[in-house]
Amino acid sequence: MNGAESMLETLVNNGVEVCFSNPGTSEMHMVAAIGKSGGMRAILSLFEGVCSGAADGYGRMAGKPACTLLHLGPGLSNASANLHNARKANSPVINLIGDHATYHKQYDAPLNSDVLGLAAPVSHWVQSVSDAQSLPGDAADAVVAANEKPGKIATLIVPADCAWNESGPAAATRVLPTMPEASESAVRKAAEMLTNGKKTILLMSNLALSERCLELADQVAQATNSRVFCDTFTPRIARGEGRCAVERLGYFAEQATVQLKGAEQLIMVGTKAPVGFFAYPGKVSEFYPPGSQLHTLAEVSENAEIALQNLVDELDAGNVELRRQLLRKPELAQGALSPETVARAFTALMPTDAIVVDESATAGFLTYPLSESAEPHEWLSLTGGSIGYGLPTAIGAAVACPNQKVICLHGDGGAMYTIQALWTMARENLDICVVIFANRKYQILQIELERVGAQSMNKKTLDMLDLSNPDLDFVKMAEGMGVKAARATTAEEFNKLFAAAMSERGPMLIETMLDVPPPPIG
């Protein structure tokens, strides 16, 4: 078999089942190999950023990598923004990047580029294949690298002749890395801090936000009179009825510093000490009070569940009764459409075990707190701050969990970055409801304009943050790519459309027309 065929068989042997692809000429032998494979599902996207975002969503929900198939350096560059988000989410992803044949590189053809240099900033592991015989082994190494918990980005660069030349047999199943445990001293130190009488905060993220980890953290908090927070943006968190609640740290310094006011000790589990998303003139970068003692119970790369279980045992808190969320559904609203009326319908009508992919930005600021008492669900956030993640990540989540409804809450500005994702949703008939918050502006940037002290509010300045003239029409865009769509201008219209989307399978987009003030900051 040729190198591409041996590589594909190796990936399948090692549990890689899905490829989100946007290939070109240098990847044709890999395309042919996927076409022959019975174990690899191929999903075409019309932009490479959709491929990488979909692989992120798949990795978050499946707990194992999908692969992307991208065309040379420019294709990788197009994918990089959502690879950045995936890297910040610690998602497992394998990138297959085609390159010019080894003997052709010397001619510096038009599509030639420094693929290694482009891959490094958005990858944890990068390997350029030297020959066809090495390809299956390199592919197996990529799988092992991507599966290093909680997940890593592995990029394999495949020159075209390495794919078409004769290769050896596929590599067998590799032993995947196990997750190391936190040290006994880290557990003992955390227990000492929690029992010394000082005001203590537990801050958690990544794998520390599973349903079981939240239960353990709740026992710790009750036994020691401490508080539990999660990061503002988390890869995945278990929420809703029956789950233990955790307070989310505010995005703005004015919020987070108030939440952490008076804290004397911070214990991190699967995350680092909290800092601002950006710097602002005259405002602090560190959200925790000066002089706070910082301690890490479990690094991001360490097993958070075992660390928390050991802490519960150390504190003898295993018999503490859990404070589970009760199901409380709000009344559906009537009249004007607003963030609150949308949040009410979203919370009341969400089905059990939904997956929520959130890139709603400012307009969706009420959906998260109100849905804390909704049906059990998983919530995926924009971890890396690079907008345009929501639609692609919803694709990956739906592919990973085909029997669960995916709800994508999205601002209109961010949606335009990867709007091509709608076509893939239609082609694959994925069970996704997209709610577009259409306020026709980059509202968050209008807020930031004032916060950074850039006070120029003239028309020329504001036009750079405005999405009108002409107005975007998401219903037409969705229908043009095969997705059923409708527009809501009142609460009653939204309630009806969202209820229908929750009861029917397949992709649906609701354009939600809003003209609202920004969310409160203080």
Image (spheres, rainbow, N blue to C red):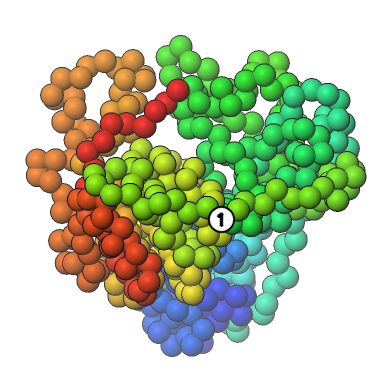
Q: Report the side of 368 relative to 315 (left or right).
A: left
Quadrant of the snapshot with the C terminus:
top left
Query: Which class describes the residues within 10 Å of circle 1: few (<14), some (14-19), or many (20+)?
Result: some
Q: In the image, residue 198 lies at what x, y percent?
A: 79, 22
Query: For the residue marked with disc 1, what is the amino acid?
Result: Leu
Q: Is residue 269 above or below residue 257?
A: below
Q: Report the side of 479 relative to 378 (left or right).
A: left
Q: Report the side of 514 relative to 159 (left or right).
A: left
Q: As drawn, which residue projects farthest toward the top?
A: 282
Which residue is more in the foreground, 25 or 78? 78
| Callout 1: SS | loop
Q: Residue at x 52, y 76 (%)?
A: 17
Q: Is residue 427 visible in the rendered structure shown here?
A: yes
Which residue is more in the foreground, 344 or 5? 344
> What residue is shown with label 1?
327
Q: Report the side of 155 relative to 500 (left or right).
A: right
Q: Quadrant of residue 429?
A: bottom left
Q: Residue at x 78, y 50 (%)?
A: 321
Q: Is residue 226 above or below residue 87?
A: above
Q: In the image, residue 500 lies at what x, y percent?
A: 32, 68
Which residue is more in the foreground, 151 or 123? 151
Q: Quadrant of residue 189?
A: top right
Q: In the image, residue 219 lies at what x, y percent?
A: 78, 45
